Image (tube, rainbow, N blue to C red):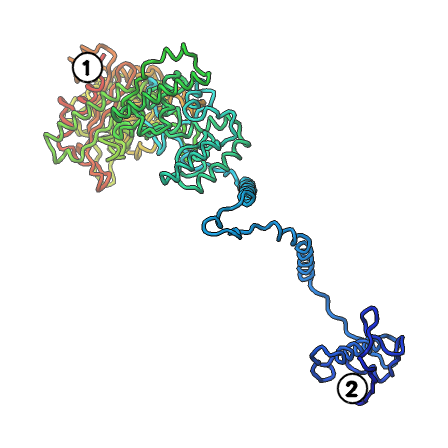
Amino acid sequence: MQLRVPDETMQLRVPEGGIPTAPSGEPSIPGGGRREIPDGIADIPSEPEEAGQNAPTGDSPTTDSGSRASRRTDTNAALPGRPGARRRRKAPKSAPAARLTAAVTAATAAVVAVLGPWLRRVRPHYPRPGRTGWKRWVPTWRQAGGAALASFGLSALTLTVAYAATDIPENLNSYATQQDTVYFWADGTPMARAGWVQRQEMELGDVPEDVRWAVLAAENESFYSDPGISAKGLTRAILRTFGQGSTQGGSTITQQYVKNVYLSQEQTYSRKFTEAMMALKLDNKMSKDEILEGYLNTSWFGRGTYGIQRAAQAYYGKDVSELNASEGAFLATLLKGAGLYDPSLGAANRTRAQERWSWTLDRMVKIGKLSPEERAGYRTFPKTLESNPLYNTGEQSDYLVELATQHAKKAAGISDKDFDRGGYQIYTTFDKKRVDQLTKAVGAARDKARKDNPKAAKHVHYGAASVAVDGRILAIHGGPDHRKQGYNESNATTVPAGSAFQPFVYAAALEHGVRKSRDGAPEPVTGETVYVGDDKVPVTTPEGPYWDRSGRKVAAKNDGGRSYGQISLHRALANSVNTTFMQLGLDTGLDKVRATAQDAGLLRSSLGAQVPALAAGSSTPSAIRMASGYTTFAAEGRHTEPYTILKVTRNGHKVATDTPDPRRAMDAGTAAEVQSALTDAFRTAYPETAAKAGGEVAGKRGTTEGDTAAWYVGTEKKVSTAVVVYRIDLAKSLEPLPLEGLGGTIADSVPYGIWSEALRPLG
């Protein structure tokens, strides 16, 4: 045959029968050995495409032989050193990913090659061959066993991965961390509570052991030995879920704690699974006592309470540390569902509660945590309170809570953020009996005003406060209802004190003396020092009359336009002579009057401008501050800042608080003289009452120019009480309005009526 090659033709003789094959499978060239190829042949392309021809197809020996000959020719042509040889371009290396893929593919092929025959032998033949009908679908025992084993292995792997992937959150949910704050009366009984959640955390050691075991007997008696979950209970819960459509039961205390503090209360399979995984992990992370303590502090017990401490107070009115096994067994009953077991909600609830309570005590005997003798002593169901005593009234108590909260934060140095977290117990100075009497007295006056003058009474306000000489605020009246009016009338600095301010002017004069000339030395004054007491007498300075900015002489007016002529300072205070004290203030020095009033307890911000009207009572102290100021006279010149906090604790631990200390505000002699004049003022105004009360009552009324406020401030048995009546339309402004008769008259003063009723019996 002839093979055409470009530029040159080579003739090859092929023996009959084709080219013989060598034993190695490679074609051999007749004559043996390697055949030398002329140099010109080296230029023949190794591939058909290089020659410009298509590759031959088919399996003919001639084509195959020709191709191999060409490959050998190319090999020889590429050898270095040969004449006419050319360097062949190297193929680029494959990428690492491709090499890895090739290696994996090769390894997989090898494994399949080895295991393939075995896998073909053991693979299940399903549906089963050789069977007909339903029998085709019945697996053999080997198939069933293999499926079960595979399912178990897959489940174990899934659980292992889920356990490893489950994390315990660092932050608890809001309901688990939030607590309420409880306020107590001065006698230690609960007054009110504040906060969205009723909860107070207690250490496990504060919970009696009988109460703890009552809970464990009712909920999870194997708590101290289980791994955090109960396989039996979990299975039961799942079966009940399939039957009833919601997950129920089967939770250990650890699982319930996880649900309380980390998860929501939704009833889903995913939540139940996550709960179980977290319970397993938490059981390895926390001690059993820590888990039990957390569970008791976060569980729901009904009546708005979370945690066993609040439950004990809500159902029995005492701390959890005071409960016995019987009471603990009832509280454990509530964990099953407070809405079904609270006896106050109906007879059916009571029956269920008694049955569950009895069963819980019997369980305690069975597990060895209660002796039969002790059990025999608990045959009567423990009576519970009808309602939660911690609920706030929302009326007067909220004013008390508001004031106590302000003082507690300041006294204990508690930030707003920390206080909002709750958990505090605030023991206040408020005397429940005094608060009730004051509230009743104000209520009667308000009702009378609405009846006599309904139009004017629409905007009437009654501020009142009682303060002891040691600074304790014993009672306040803040308003009709805190839910309707958050404005605290006892703490408002809105209306002038009027003639009720005169004792502070008198004290300043007694302390510092008076100046009759610009350069003269101060002259001492006493109660017998005489001043002019006539109505509308202009006040004077060493240079002459005092002129106001409008160019008019400044003069004071006495109540009823009465003139007293020459009158002693002691008697002028007893009779509330305004003209005398306006002049006395100017002679003493208005700066000294301000300083004395401030030392006695009035706030600097309420003292007003340093003008003659200051001595006439232009200052606007609150009822609390006026009462506090008058205590300085009764305390022999020593003043203690008013406060409402006796003690603060948080979750049973005492919080350090600052209690105000008494300080010297004025000379004891000065205070005694002012107190004596106030005693005479009370006797002069109300001689019959004074005779019955004895010598321990002192007080003074206060009126204002323009009749915008009426006061009465007095001291009885080392307690000073201030009452003010005024009118303000809060919807428009804080500008006082005329009382229009709601303050009463000098002989029939409404503030005095409230004051005397609040302190009844006097003396």
Q: Dot 2 lies on which element?
A: strand
Which quadrant holds residue 262?
A: top left
Instruction: Check the picture and name the quadrant holding the N terminus.
Output: bottom right
Disc number placed over residue 3 in the picture, else none: 2
Say which of 109 and 301 sits in front: 109
Q: Amino acid at mark 1?
A: Arg
Q: Residue furthest left?
A: 452
- Residue at image point 44% right, 21% down: 212
Residue 422's label in the rendered image is: none
User: Label 2 amino acid?
Assistant: Leu
Quadrant of the image containing the C terminus:
top left
Mark carried by residue 683: 1
Above or below, 72 against 362 in this view is: below
Q: Which residue shows up at 21% across the image and 19% down it? A: 574
Query: Which residue corresponds to the image point at 74% horizontal and 84% vertical from the top-left?
Result: 51
Question: Residue 343 sits in which quadrant?
Answer: top left
The image position of residue 541, as x and y in percent, is 27, 31
Camera-side residue of 144 and 52 = 144
